Image: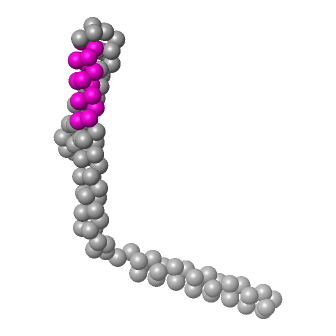
Amino acid sequence: MNKILRAEGKKRDKRCQMTALVTMALLIMAPMNAFAAAQVQGKINNLYSIVTTIITAAGAIVLAWGVFEFASAYQSRDTAQQTDSLKKVVAGILMCLAPTIINLLK
C-alpha cells in the first residue's frame, strides 16, 4: 500500500512540476512586445504601393484597348463588339480607380 501511495505522490509531484513549468513559460512569453511592427508595416505599405501601381497600369492598358476596340466597332457598326468594348472601358476605369476606391472604403 505504501508503494502505491508513493507512486501516486510522485506522479502528482511530476504533474505539479509540469504545470508550474508550463505556467512560468506562459508568463514569461506573455508580456513580450513586438518592436518590429513599424518595419513590418513599412514593408506591407511598399507591397501595397507596388500592387496598386501594377493594377493601375493594367487598368490603363485595358482602358486604352477598350477605347480602341470601341472606335473600331463604331466604325464598322458592330453592336455586339461595341458592347464588349464598353465593358472593357468600364473595367479599365475601375482598375485605374481601384486604389482610390480602396482608400475611400477604409
Judged from this view, the residue extending furthest toward the right is 1
> Split into 4 quadrants, where in the image is the N terminus?
bottom right
The quadrant holding residue 56 is: top left
Q: Residue at x 29, y 56 (%)?
A: 47
The image shows residue 2 at horizontal and vertical percentages of: 78, 92
Q: Residue at x 68, y 84 (%)?
A: 11
Residue 66 drawn above or below residue 75: below
Q: Residue at x 23, y 35 (%)?
A: 60
Q: Is residue 96 left or right of residue 83?
A: left
Q: Is residue 75 visible?
A: yes
The image shows residue 90 at horizontal and vertical percentages of: 25, 26
Q: Nearer the viewer, residue 19 or 56?
A: 56
Residue 71 is a magenta residue: yes
Q: Is residue 55 left or right of residue 29?
A: left
Q: Residue at x 57, y 86 (%)?
A: 17
The quadrant holding residue 96 is: top left
Q: Nearer the viewer, residue 46 or 81?
A: 81
The image shows residue 6 at horizontal and vertical percentages of: 73, 90
Q: Is residue 95 visible?
A: no
Question: How many marks overall?
Answer: 0
Please give the range of residues in magenta. 60-74
Q: Nearer the viewer, residue 24 or 81?
A: 81
The quadrant holding residue 18 is: bottom right
> Split into 4 quadrants, where in the image is the C terminus?
top left
Please tell me whether the stretch drawn in magenta is mainly helix, strand or loop: helix
Residue 29 is a magenta residue: no
Q: Is residue 91 left or right of residue 14?
A: left
Residue 24 drawn above or below residue 74: below
